Amino acid sequence: MASASRLLPPTPPPHSAASPPARHRHPTLAAPLSRRPINPPRLRCRAASAAAAAGAAATTTTGGGGGALVLEGSGAGAVAVREFVTLDELRAAVRLRIRTFYEYATDSYGAEDLRKSLADREYDALQDRISGKMINFQRVSCINGTVPLLPSLVSAEELCSTCKFVEDGEERVVVGSLDLNQCLWLPDELTGKRPGVNESSHTRAYLSNVCVAKELQRNGLGYALVDKSKKLAREWGITDLYVHVAINNEAAQKLYNKCGFVYESEEPAWKARFLGRPRRLLLWLDLKKDAL
């Protein structure tokens, strides 16, 4: 699946967490909003492994396995898959991404402060992308899969407490998320070749930050998120949709193949070593021919 966003500003984390944002409605998005020298928290980015887990979570619509929770209702049909509605929901989606793309020892000194700092920085960066304040991004939408706070989620206490938000008096949980980016390229990623130089480049888009909560794997959430992004991309006039995936992530590759993506190119080994990650494949979907 796509990796964690590499668009965070290179500022050190603050000493204290930001106060919760006031609730606002999309699309009237408001304007965007110590180092500890001893025993730092044990935290490392796991963008590739998290993407693999998310890919495995989404490749099939049947079967639980691995102790995963089963949604009440009809699997992915019990999930509301849509563009984000409130800023509270957007912040909950960011917390799911931090939870997915980073692992940390909860007993480490300062781990919780660092996690909050990462979430605050990604939240601000995501708002900048959505509101059009970041160069190269013509249009960005955050698509989430959310469920009501159901009794079946009682065993996923940490997920519910981390990714919960309130909408119209109802408590809901973000269980899957991705970004649809209308742009020419993504930072530190392979660039798509389509459309060609003689065609409009404004019809190219990329998926990024694709993730599904590990507790709800194998409920078809990944497929539902990608399907929603394809429909929205068509509404935007997108003809060529791209996604990056780790070369050793077979589960995610199967998901994207199921969604109609095909191989276009792959990252050079030297670049992957320089960025400290597994090599990436660039997959392409022709939305002009893809069946609705």
Image (cartoon, rainbow, N blue to C red):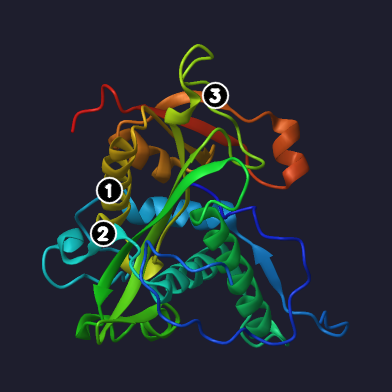
**In the displayed structure, does residue 176 sit left or right of residue 46?**
left
Q: Residue at x 34, y 42 (%)?
A: 255
Residue marked by disc 2: 81
Q: Indicate the amino acid at tag 3.
A: Ser
> Does the CB distance between marks 2 and 3 fall below 8 Å?
no
Tell me where residue 80 appears, x and y as whole percent.
Answer: 22, 64
**Distance of label 1 from label 2 (alpha carbons):** 7 Å
Q: Residue at x 12, y 63 (%)?
A: 74
Within-10-Å neighbours for mark 3: few <14, some 14–19, many 20+ = some
- Ranked by sequence position, the earlier of labels 2 and 3 is 2
Residue located farthest toward the top when viewing the structure as drawn: 198
Residue marked by disc 3: 265
Within-10-Å neighbours for mark 1: few <14, some 14–19, many 20+ = some
Tell me where residue 7 appears, x and y as whole percent.
Answer: 64, 54
Mark 3 residue element: strand
Quadrant in the picture for residue 81: bottom left
